[in-house]
Amino acid sequence: MEIDETVQLRSVRKTYGPPERMVTALDGVTAAFRAGTFTAVMGPSGSGKSTLLHCAAGLDRPTEGQVVIDGADLGELDETGLTLLRRERVGFVFQAFNLVSALTAEQNVSLPLRLAGRGPSPAQTRAALDEVGLADRLEHRPSQLSGGQQQRVAIARALITRPAVVFADEPTGALDTKASRQVLDLLRGLVDRQGQTVIMVTHDPLAAARADRVLFLADGRVVEEFAREVSAAAVAARMANLEAAAC
Ligand code: ADP
Ligand code: MG
C-alpha cells in the first residue's frame, strides 16, 4: 500500500433500499487521496457526493469494496473500532455546522475529545480556536456568532484531535461570499502550512478552484478528474455539461 495515500477507496459500491427498489448511490468508485492535498468533489445533485464522503469517512459502510484510512482497512474494524477511528483520525465539517447550541465555542471544540475520555487542556482548545481566528470568541454560543464564525468553530472542532483527514460536505453552502472565502482560505492554509489532508464536496466552482484536484461524479461514478492549475471557469463548464447530461 502507498503510505502517502491517506484515504483510499477501492471499487466502492453503495446501494440503498430493498432489491426491487434499489438505488445505486456509488457504482464502483476507486480513488486515492494523498497526504497533504486538498481535493474537491463535484457533481450534479444525487450523483453520490455525500455518500462518497460518508463511506470514505467511516460514517457509513459500503455495500461492496474497500476503504482504507491512514493504513486502517475500515472493513476489518468492528463498530467500536470504527467509532474510535472516526473520533480520533477523522474530522468532519457539515454544511449546517452542527454545533451544540447550548454550549460555548470552547465547549463545542473540546466535545469530541471529552467524549473520547481525554478532555483537551484549555490551552489546546484555545490554540484550536486561535488557529481559526476566533481566540476572542471562546465564551460565545453559536447564536452569538455569524454563520462564518460558526463554521470556523466547527472546523476547530474537526481539528482538535489532529485527524489524518478532514472531510467537508458543502462547508460554504450556507455562507455568503465573504464568509465562504474565509473558510476556503482557512482550509487551504491548513493544507499548505500543516500538510493537512482535506476532501471537500462543493457546488461552487470558485470553491473547487481552491483545491489541488477536482473529482467529478456522475451517477455514482468518477467520470473526470482535474489536477493542478484548476480554473473556476473550466470547472463551471464541466459542471454545466454534467448537469445537462443528468437532466
Ligand atoms: P449528492 O450528495 O451528490 O446529492 P447523495 O450521495 O446524497 O448525492 O445521494 C446519491 C443517491 O443515493 C441519490 O439517488 C439519493 O437519493 C440516494 N440516497 C442517498 N442516501 C440515501 C438513503 N439513506 N436512503 C436511500 N437513498 C439514498
Ligand atoms: Mg450531498
Image (tube, helix red, strand yellow):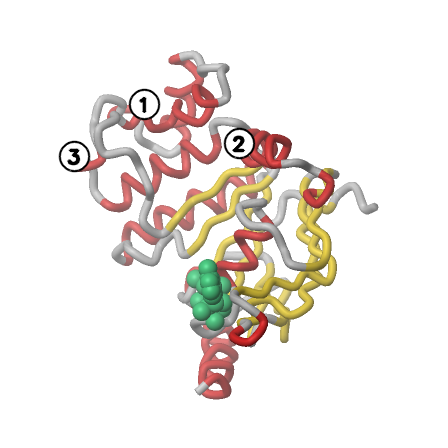
Q: Which residue is mark 1?
A: 106
Could you tell me which secondary element the residue under label 2 belongs to? helix
Could you tell me which secondary element the residue under label 3 belongs to? helix
Disc 2 residue crowd, few under 14, some 14–19, many 20+, Cα 10 Å: some
Residue 209 visible (yes or no): no
Residue 32 visible (yes or no): yes
Residue at 70% across / 45% down in the picture? 75
Residue at 47% across / 27% down in the picture? 160
Kind of residue sitting beneath label 1? Glu
Q: Nearer the viewer, mark 1 or mark 2?
A: 2
**Left or right, residue 118 beside residue 68:** left
First of labels 1, 2 by sequence position: 2
CA separation in Å, label 1 and label 2: 18 Å
Q: Which residue is mark 2?
A: 87
First of labels 3, 2 by sequence position: 2
Position in image of residue 174 (x %, y %): 29, 55
**Left or right, residue 230 beside residue 12:** left
Q: Which residue is mark 3?
A: 144
**In contact (CB < 8 Å): disc 3 and disc 1:** no
Residue at 60% across / 62% down in the picture? 14
Kind of residue sitting beneath label 2? Arg
Could you tell me which secondary element the residue under label 1 belongs to? helix
First of labels 3, 1 by sequence position: 1
Q: Ligand 2 is located in which of the four quadrants?
A: bottom left
Please name whichever residue, 17 or 119, is drawn nearer the observer in this view of the structure.
17
CA separation in Å, label 3 and label 1: 13 Å
